[in-house]
Image (tube, rainbow, N blue to C red):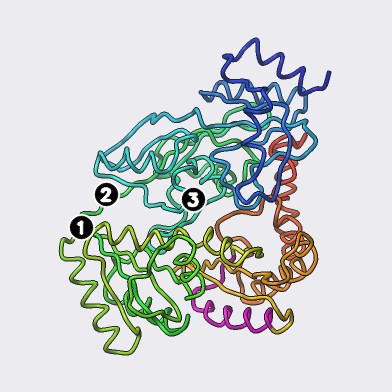
Amino acid sequence: MSDAVRMIEELRAILPERAIVSDPEAIAPWLTDWRGRWTGKAAALLQPSSTEEVQAIVRACAAHRVPIVPQGGNSSMVGGATPDDSGQAVILSLRRMTRIRELDVGPRQIVVEAGMVLETLHDKLAEQDLRLPIDLGARGSATIGGLVSTNAGGTQVLRHGTMGERVVGLEAVMADGSLLDTLNPLKKDNRGPRLDRLMIGGEGLFGIVTAVRLALTDLPKASATAWVGVRDPAEALELLRFCDARTDAIEGFEMMPQDVVAAAEAEFGLRAPLDEPQAIHVLIEAKSSDGALRGAIEAILADALEEGLATDAVVARSQAQADAMWAIRHSLSDAEKRFYGMANSHDISVPVDALPAFLDDARAMIEGDFPGVSVSGYGHLGDGNIHLHVRAMDRASDGWRAGEGAAIEKRVHDLVTDHGGSISAEHGIGVMKRGELERLDPIRTEMLRRIKRALDPDGILNPGKLV
């Protein structure tokens, strides 16, 4: 009998029956990552419904040295929530931990458990005229704990920052089953460095987030969504600066080249709202308490057109039109994969002002040195985060990604580093980028390893990820 099997039998005596899933068919959907690139095995799927049950599970795993893979919505883009193929690990699902423990309307804060799905939280907060200003395509499956553990970004970082910047405090179960609790809303706490910051972007390596206190904002009274055509990324950046100088209401500024928009139109029957194809499409979203916001955005874009900073523009006249614009943006990843086939996807960031030059350099270098591939990038121009895709085109094969694709990936990451950027803007490191992180940033990697050894000496928390 393996250590994992013995541990599971011990847990049956202290946990509810529904907390332990050992049926292979029930476990199977949670063994493969969102991209379908990594598939592992697990001895069991454990589904606690309270922090105390998480602590009991972690203590049992620590006693038997059974690896734990924490999992929220299983929407990781880098294999960060997938077990290895040994079959010795257990998946610890937080999806049953969905309570709102506290909602403070006055200071606009909420304490919510880690398994709450982002979209569900959005709906509950809207009932109180509040919101968590974090949004992304996986809102219907991504959980709060997962968003904290990856320090997720999304489309509103330009104004409101990443998930980590919304975290006031948190609760996390450590590798020995002890509890780190910083949920009290202290304005000042100078007892040394903020230990809970290790959990933000920590990918479950240093502790398992079970609850979070989040800073909220008022639900906007007005919104305006616009679709604009520009000639190139440099002009898109000029347009961003032009808009920012005239209003502080801009929350989203998404840049999309014609080739990926065309893929969304071809694959899903969506239609870009401008009459003619554009070299670069820009999706702008503004929110405020001002009921005249749409008129203000229309005036700003009219001035931009007059000054030659755009080729065409339209402002949504209804929420349905705004939703249709966002449907195109959120479909791009799937549309591009279906339309163009295999690609290397790079979730990277560079300083905002360096982004146009980076895109030009990346396209020239990769397409010049690897004839037959195609480079394209879309994403969050306002925070420097671009999803740069290198398409295999007619070279696509099972071995392409491991061969030429791997060489291309290193070249892209070297170029990102040369531009002062990061090889992971919002998806984390997981399995996919672990080797590249060590190659490009050995000092950071070694520091993370030292912290990992100190907090988890047996290495049971999400092994094989990040470092």
Tell me how far mark 3 sits from mark 1, CA to CA: 25 Å
In contact (CB < 8 Å): disc 1 and disc 2: yes
Q: Earlier in the sequence, mark 1 or mark 2?
A: 2
403 with respect to 347 (left or right): right
How far across and how far down the image is residue 130, in percent? 28, 45
Kind of residue indicated by mark 1: Ser
What residue is pinned by disc 3? 164
Kind of residue indicated by mark 3: Gly
Give neighbour class at mark 1: few <14, some 14-19, many 20+ (Cα, 10 Å). few
Looking at the rendered image, the disc whose residue lies closer to the viewer, 3 or 1, is 1
How far across and how far down the image is residue 376, in percent? 57, 73
Q: What is the secondary structure assignment of the residue under circle 3?
A: helix
What residue is pinned by disc 1? 289
Q: What is the secondary structure assignment of the residue under circle 2?
A: strand
Question: Residue 178 falls in which quadrant of the image?
Answer: top right
Q: Earlier in the sequence, mark 3 or mark 1?
A: 3
The stretch drawn in magenta includes residue 360: yes
Note whether 397 is above or below 57 in the view shown. Answer: below
What secondary structure do most residues of the magenta stretch adopt?
helix
Give neighbour class at mark 3: few <14, some 14-19, many 20+ (Cα, 10 Å). many
